[in-house]
Amino acid sequence: MEKTIADLRKDYTLEGLSETEIDPNPFIQFQKWFEQTLSAQLIEPNAMTLATATPDGKPSARMVLLKDFDQRGFVFFSNYNSRKGQELAENPQASLVFWWAELERQVRISGHVEKVSETESDKYFEIRPVKSRLGAWVSNQSEVIASREFLEQRMQEFQSKYENQEIPRPPHWGGLRVIPSEIEFWQGRSSRLHDRLLYTHLKDGSWKIERLSP
């Protein structure tokens, strides 16, 4: 009998996640898990879903790449004039989701969003491949265009413009940092009785850890 979508399922059995195993600092716990994704040689382990919303609550989501994280938060880069950039300017709240299927793990992050400093944006822009730097000028991200040829023509124009010279960072392009108020670590378990440990940031700067029902 041919399988349907409803028939697709996997029982998660690799590991568990207990309160005695995790670090009291969620950033250190994230670092541990992220290093394990690197050791496992997962494809683009820094890929994450970014969910934003308009002021009236209309949501949108897309995949972006994590490019830095520390105690301040989680950083990605984008065109500030894009749909996500405009939504975050009007409603600076976002959620991130990492899904590492091979490790049967998920991390969910929610919090306030702010632009990184221009120095941080410049530093990252300088290490991007040349064509990626040009692409930041070529693409008016999220705008309707007539054809693929339109993009290719603009790429040729900017290649000629910046031939044999430094490519500056566009003023409308830079980093955004998600400053978390909540971080949830999810470990798949058998019979759908998954482990979910939620860190909530408190006013005194500490983190409260609670177990959630799956």
Image: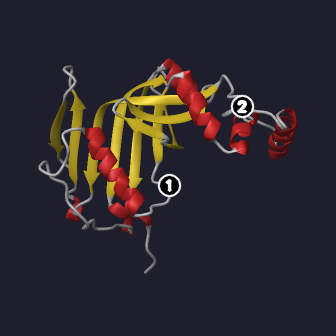
Horizontal and vertical percent for residue 61? Answer: 50, 39
With 38 as the anchor, is 126 left or right in this view? right
What residue is at 56 percent from the left and 27 percent from the top?
85
Q: Position of residue 135 (x, y in %)?
A: 72, 39
> Would you identify the image quadrant in which residue 94 lies?
top left
Q: Is 199 rendered above or below residue 80?
A: below
Residue at x 54% of width, y 30% of height: 175
CB contact under 8 Å: marks 2 and 1:
no
The one nearer the camera, 77 or 51, is 77
> Where is residue 161 shown, x and y percent of the image?
86, 32
Residue at (50, 29) in percent of width and height: 176
Give whichever of 190, 158 is nearer the camera.
158
In the image: residue 173, left or right of residue 46? right
Q: Which numbered tag is attached to residue 140?
A: 2
Q: Which residue is mark 1?
A: 44
The colour scheme of the drawn protein is: secondary structure
Q: CA distance from mark 2 to mark 1?
A: 25 Å
User: Which badge, 2 or 1, is on the more N-terminal residue?
Assistant: 1
Please name whichever residue, 188 or 27, is drawn nearer the observer in this view of the structure: 27
**As rendered, which of 55 and 163 lies closer to the eye?**
163
